[in-house]
Amino acid sequence: MSDIVYGGGKIGPSTYEVYAQLEVDSGRVPLAVADWLEQNVKGPPPWNFDGERPDWDEDIVFAPRDVVAFGGSLWFALRVNGGVQPGTDATAWVQLLPGIDMALYDNLIAEASAVRDQAALSEASAGVARLAAQDAAQLSEAAAQTALLGTIYADKATGEAATANGQQFVAYGPEGSYATRYRMVADVGVEQDSYPNRSALDAVADGMIRVEQSQSPDRPTHSLENGSGMAVADFYARGVALPSINVGAPPNPDEPFEEGVSGFYNDSGFRPFAVDMFGWDLPGGGRMESGPKGVKIIQRDGSIALGDVDAPIAPIDISPIFGGDLALVSDRRLALHVGSLLKVRRDDGLLVVTVSNRNGAYTRSACDGTIELDPARLGGQTDMVIRQKGQAAGIARIVTARVKAVPVSGSPTLTGLFIGDSITNRQTAQKCNALLTSWGYVPTWIGTINGAGTADGNDATGPLGEGREGWAFSDFLGTKQDADWSSIVAPGEELAYLALNKANKRLANPFLNPDTGAGSAAPIVTVSGTNYRFDLGHYLSRFSLATPGLFVLNVGMNDMLEEDDATGLAQVTNGYGYLVNEIRRVAPTAKILIWATTMPRGSAGDLYWPRWAAILAAMEQFVRARAAGGDANIRLCSAWAHQSQEAGWLQTLGAVDAATGFAPYELTEPVHPLYGGRDQHSEPLAAAIANFF
C-alpha cells in the first residue's frame, strides 16, 4: 500500500487501498477504481462506522460492514452478529488495519468523504456544462440524450452486438419512451438503470402544478392545480379530496362533504357510496354495518333486514396505569408517553390525554406520542384528563406536580438502599447517583453488591445496593429456591461472603435469619431442614450497615416471567406487603419509593404487556392503599409512563438495504432497557428522590 499524508501529519494507505485489501481478505473481488468511486457517490460507503459508539459492545447487534474499535485495532463485521467478541469468530469479524489508531481512521473516513464530495462536485459541474450547452445550441431531445448517455442504440440486441463484455451501452425502449443502460456480462446485456423520455414527463407535468399550503388542520398541506389554476386534488394530513371524491379529508365549505365520512359525492351532496368509521351507506338510504355479531343490513326506516341485533359493545378502557404524583426538577422537561399509560396497546390514537395546570394557562394534549411537561410552567394542583375520541365525557384526576429547584443549597445528605433485580443492577443506581450529585445532593448508598457502572451488567464499579439479576420476591423471601440462589449466608460467614465476586454473591441469600423469633413477620421458610425468615434488621446488623433513610424498590419483573399470571400477580402483591412491613419494623419513618419500567413495542413486549400492566396496576393500588392508611412516607414513581416504548431497547437487525441504508428491525428483548432507555427511567426516578428530600 502507498503512504498518503492526512491531516495532522498522519501517514497511511489511501481509502481505496483499504477497501480493496479488505475485499481480498474477505474472499471478494474488489471493484475497479471508477466503479468504486461511482458507488461512493451514488450509494453507501464500503463500511459503516458509528462515531458516537465506536467501541465494540456485547449488547449491540452489528450489521455486515459495521466497523468497531476493539483491542487497539479496528474490526469489520462480515455478518449480522451480537455478543461475538472480535477475534473469536472468523466468520463474524475480520481485522481491519491491525493497530490503527482512531485519529488515523477518522482521517481515512474524512478522505473518503472528500473523494465522494469531489466526485459529486465534478458530476454536478459536468451537468451544469451540459445544460448550458443545450440552452446555447438549442439541442434536440435526441441530441441531449446522446450527450448525456453516449451512443444510444435502437434496441438492446443492436447494443449487445456492438459492446464488449464489461462495457456499458444504452438502448431505446418501446416507442422511445425511455432508454435503458446495460452492462455486458457473459455476452448478455444486464440492466443497470432506466431514463425516462423528457417529452413524456413534460406532458404529465405541464398540466399539473404542486402548490404548498400553509399548515392548518382545515387546509390542505399540498394541492395540484391545472394550467388554469383550478385545484384538481387537495392533500391533507390524513386524507385527500378529489372532484366528487373524499377520502378522510376534513369538510370543505365549497364541497358537499360531511365530517368523518369518505365516499363519492355529486354537486348536490348525494352520495351513492360513502364510508364512515361504523359502516357503509347503500343506495336508497340503507346501511351496512359490522358489529360483534357480524355484518347487518339496516333499512331506511331503521329496521334490520339481515343480521342480528348487536349486544352492547364494551367501552374502551381509558383508565390509565399511573400512580402517585408528577415529580420534576427545574433543569429539564419530563416526558409523558401516552402509549406507556394505557393497559391496552394501540396504534390508532383513540384517546386524548390532557395535562393542565390549575394555577396557570399551561395545557398540553396528545392522542399518541409524547407530552413534554415544562417545570417552568407546571406546579401544584394539576388536572390529568383522559377522553375517548368522539365522546364528550371522560375521566379526570387531580395530581400534584412537584417541581424541585436544582441545584439545591447546603449539600443535603441522604443514605439509601436500592433493592431490586437486573434492571436495578444495570446502571440505575449509577445514573441516579450522578444526577443527584449534579443537583447538589451528597448521597451514600449501602448494600453488599456493587451495581454496574457501565453498560456491562457484570461490571461492579457502580454504587452499592442489592440489585440481584434474576431475583423475584420468592428469591428475596426464600419461599422458592431455584437457579438464582443456591446458598444462605450463615451467621459468622459475613466476611467470606463479602470477599466473593459479584457473580457468586448473587447466588447467596444474605437476608434469611435462622432466628425466626427475632421480630420479622415474613413467612417462615424451610431450607435443608432449617427454618428461616426474611429479616431486614438481621441483614443491616450483620454487615454493620447504617439504617437507610430511603429505600428504592423495584421487584416484580421476574415474578411475572417465572410464574403464571395469577401466581406472579399474587407474589408481587404479597411480596411488597412483606417487604414494606419489614422496612417499617426496622425504619418506621424512612422514605420508601417503589418504581418500575415499561416494555417495548414488538412481538415479545406486546405479548407480556397485558400481564405486566396488571402488575403495575396492582403496585399502584398497593401504594395508594398504604398512603390512605396513614403512611405519609411511601410513594410510587411511575417511571414506565416517562419511558418510551419505541427507543432505548435492544434491536435485532436484518440485512441493510443498499439503496436506503435502512435495515428491518424488531425490539426483541422486552425486559432490559439499553442506552438512552436507562436514562429515560433513571431521570424520573432521580427526580422523585429529589422531591422526597
Image: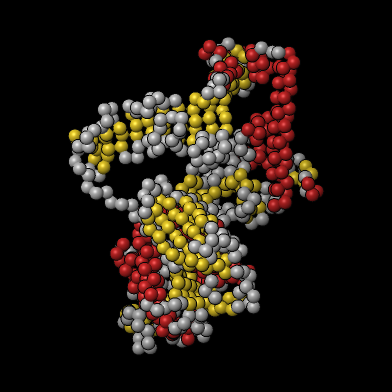
**46 lies left or right of 79:** right
Which residue does the image show at 40% across and 38% down from the upper left?
259
Is residue 151 visible in the rendered structure shown here? no
**538 lies left or right of 458:** left
Instruction: Report the label total.
Output: 0
Which residue does the image show at 63% across and 21% down from the upper left?
167
Q: Residue 542 location, x and y as percent?
A: 47, 85
Farthest right residue in view: 9
Q: Residue 192 location, x and y as percent?
A: 57, 25
Seen from the viewer's position, the closer of residues 76 and 28 is: 76
Q: Is residue 408 above or below residue 310?
A: below
**159 lies left or right of 235:** right
Image quadrant containing the C terminus: bottom right
Seen from the viewer's position, the closer of residues 665 and 640 is: 640
Image quadrant containing the N terminus: top right
Q: Residue 288 location, x and y as percent?
A: 27, 35
Task: Give residue 488's quadrant in the image.
Answer: bottom left
**223 lies left or right of 628:** right
Seen from the viewer's position, the closer of residues 161 and 593 is: 593
Q: How is the image coloured?
A: secondary structure
Which residue does the image show at 74% across and 18% down from the upper left?
133
Is residue 379 visible in the rendered structure shown here? yes
Which residue does the image show at 70% across and 40% down from the upper left?
113
Seen from the viewer's position, the closer of residues 492 and 170 is: 170
Q: Residue 404 location, x and y as percent?
A: 57, 69
Q: Is residue 532 above or below residue 237?
A: below
